[in-house]
Image: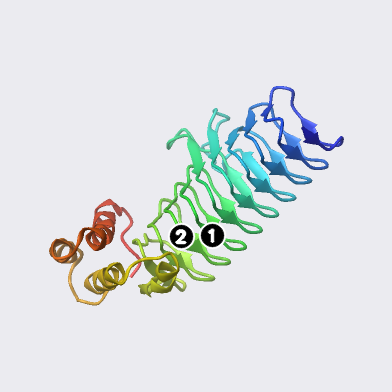
């Protein structure tokens, strides 16, 4: 192991032999870290925390701390982090609570820039980008490929669908369907995230289907139930790849408990 002599690592912690740990970092007894992960200086990793391969934690991050929840009574809860995540300075990721699933889960290939906060019981997918000072309250779900701009904040229990874009300084108190771009305080929808989808290789047919689905939800004057019916009809007219994107938006509407940002 490449362990700085000033680092404090509990003997019960499970670190792969290739893990690097920088100066003055502290790793607790119930932590497990897989191969290739780098822990920079002054990082604290505690709690029942499992970290995958090839992650990169920068200085002063606090990972696996207890949930910031007044109901928390010291119960054993968990934090799980996947592979190849970049975690920059001063990020804070908390363990879950027994009032929910008891675990905070972060996927793989994500970028968390400085001062990002992921609260208890959150679920973050893969390939997301959290810009500086983006913050999630408890119980938030974030899908794959979501971009959270700087200083954006998400209310507890909100859901953000895959490929959505949350603009700078946005205060989000309702759900964001897949592919939708929102910004403002309070958040409002401002179209589909077409530029991001083009960069990810979406076909013209898929982009057109997503654009039309956005219009049905936001621009047609339909009620939400009427929009669901219209989306079903729209999907039936498309090829399989384009229809799959429409159904992703349609099915998200059924799972939204807080209503969608308009």
Query: Which mark is on residue 178?
Result: none
At a point 41% along the width and 51% down the height, the residue shown is 157
Which one is earlier in the sequence, the residue at label 2 or at label 1? 1
- In this figure, what is the number of numbered marks? 2
Label 1: element kind: strand
Q: At which x and y percent is residue 66? A: 60, 38
Quadrant holding the C terminus? bottom left
Q: Residue at x 58, y 38 (%)?
A: 52
**Which residue shows up at 69% across the image and 48% down it?**
61
The quarter of the displayed image where residue 88 is located: bottom right
Residue bearing the label numbered 1 = 129
Task: Report the side of 113 relative to 187 (left or right).
Answer: right
Between 100 and 146, the one nearer to me in the picture: 146
Q: Is residue 180 above or below residue 111?
A: below
Would you say the residues marked 2 and 1 are in contact, meaning their CB atoms lie under 8 Å apart? yes
Q: Residues within 10 Å of mark 2 (few under 14, many from 20)?
A: many
In the foreground, 172 or 150: 150
Residue picked out by circle 2:
146
Q: Can the viewer see residue 187 in this picture?
A: no
Give the farthest residue toward the right.
Answer: 5
> Front-most of 1 and 13?
1
């Amino acid at each position: 192991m490449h362990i700085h002599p000033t680092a404090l690592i509990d003997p019960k912690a499970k670190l792969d032999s290739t893990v690097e740990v920088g100066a003055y970092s502290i790793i607790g007894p119930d932590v497990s870290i897989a191969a290739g992960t780098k822990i920079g200086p002054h990082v604290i990793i505690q709690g029942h925390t499992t970290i995958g391969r090839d992650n990169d934690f920068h200085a002063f991050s606090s990972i696996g701390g207890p949930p910031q929840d007044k109901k928390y009574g010291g119960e054993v809860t968990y934090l799980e982090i996947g592979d190849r995540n970049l975690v920059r300075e001063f990020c804070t990721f908390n363990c879950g609570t027994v009032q929910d699933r008891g675990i905070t889960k972060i996927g793989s290939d994500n970028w968390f820039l400085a001062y990002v906060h992921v609260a208890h019981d959150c679920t973050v997918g893969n390939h997301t980008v959290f810009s500086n000072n983006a913050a999630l309250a408890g119980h938030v779900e974030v899908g794959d490929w979501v971009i959270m701009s700087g200083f954006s904040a998400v209310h507890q229990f909100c859901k953000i669908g895959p490929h959505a874009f949350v603009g700078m300084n946005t205060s989000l108190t309702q759900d964001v369907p897949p592919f939708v771009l929102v910004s403002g305080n309070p958040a409002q929808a401002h179209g589909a995230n077409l530029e991001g989808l083009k960069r990810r290789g979406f076909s013209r047919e898929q982009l057109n289907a997503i654009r039309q689905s956005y219009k049905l939800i936001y621009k047609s004057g339909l009620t939400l139930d009427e929009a669901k019916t219209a989306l079903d009809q729209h999907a039936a007219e498309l090829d399989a790849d384009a229809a799959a994107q429409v159904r992703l938006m349609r099915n998200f509407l059924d799972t939204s408990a807080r209503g969608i940002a308009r």
